[in-house]
Image (cartoon, rainbow, N blue to C red):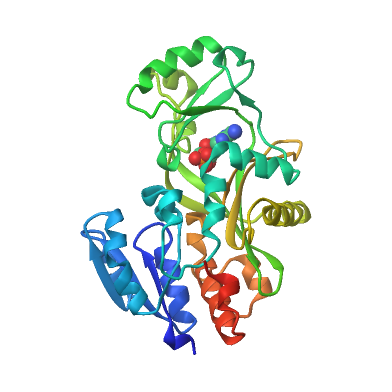
Amino acid sequence: MSKKYKIATLGSHSALQILKGAKDEGFETVLIGIKDRIEPYTSFKVADKVYEIEKHHDFFDIEDKLIEENCILIVHGSFVEFLGPENIEKIRMLHYGNSRILKWESDRNLERKWLLSAGLNLPCIFENPEDIDRPVIIKFHGAGGGKGYFLANSPREFYEKFERYEDENRDYVIQEYIVGVPVYAHYYYSRLNDELELMSFDKRYESNADSIGRIKAKDQLTVGIQTSYTITGNIPIVVRESLLPRFFEMGRNVVEESKKIEDGGLYGPFCLECIIDNHLEFFTFEISARIVAGTNPFVGGSPYTDLRYDEPMSTGRRVARDIKEAIAADRLDTVLS
Ligand code: AMP
């Protein structure tokens, strides 16, 4: 039955594991790839068919072909980044997940409302730079992958540094900087069985934040190095086991709250991006309401999916499994938009 449908996605972000997982579940796969960025997908042999496009928005030009071929589209972070949540709501072809929920992750105010009403602890926000009275991180809206963030400790430092970011989009948020460790929790919630799964955890490998400790503080000051958070990769984490109940509780609360704020709620893969401080207090600074690239180290499964499944289960494969089970149960409309 699953032979009838194909799984398609855009070549970037987490496409390798999405397509590999789909093949493992018996689907034919289709890659929509930007010219010059297709080699990984052909070299790793995860795409049965490739549609080449010039720029991301050209996706809409080939959408009819994808519909004819019975493709189910898997939306990932690059779709959200390059097309924008408003365009994702315009997708006509079958696609996995609730695309209406994506606007809640893309709009900082909506995101905050959602997470707070789910009972999560969030870093403080400073509406006015004059109010800065502790370490803060300044994030420019739409700054892809942590690029262009900066830190400040006072209104003066804020204004001094802000001047250097002339090229950045001027829409920004001033967030309390939490001193702790980043932990990104990857979840899966299936509407078919109403079960929440913890798939894996990662932290990001960020330039230059992750290498600055290799330079003496004195030299950092002499050279005037500024911390930046440009993401270059992801590192797997296994958390202290006693923290797991809290992670389950947070994930469950977010899912339950999503059902109240948006018709159909959140389902499929999602991620809570947290900092845990030295008192083991959790601060959630972001939610991604779709697959995150932090699941990429787990193409062959994670220590957590190993516990639950007797076969390698990536998040990409879990999506394909959900679709396969929905087809078998004649409930495809439960998992697709
Ligand atoms: P983001 O792009 O929001 O996922 O953040 C990029 C990186 O900045 C994270 O991986 C963290 O290392 C760091 N970061 C973001 N927000 C905070 C915060 N409120 N406190 C401390 N570190 C943060």
Viewer-closest of 179 and 185: 185
Residue 117 at x, y = what percent? 73, 43
Residue 289 visible (yes or no):
no
- The residue depicted at 71 percent of the width and 53 percent of the height is 260
The quadrant holding residue 62 is bottom left
Residue 250 at x, y = what percent? 73, 51
Residue 146 at x, y = what percent? 45, 38
Outermost residue toward the bottom in this view: 1
**Left or right for 234, reference 185:** left
Outermost residue toward the top in this view: 156
- The residue depicted at 58 percent of the width and 57 percent of the height is 270
Q: Is residue 268 above or below residue 4?
A: above
- The residue depicted at 51 percent of the width and 44 percent of the height is 106
Q: Quadrant of ligand 1?
A: top right
The quadrant holding residue 274 is top right
Residue 190 at x, y = what percent? 64, 69
- The residue depicted at 46 percent of the width and 85 percent of the height is 26
Residue 304 visible (yes or no):
yes
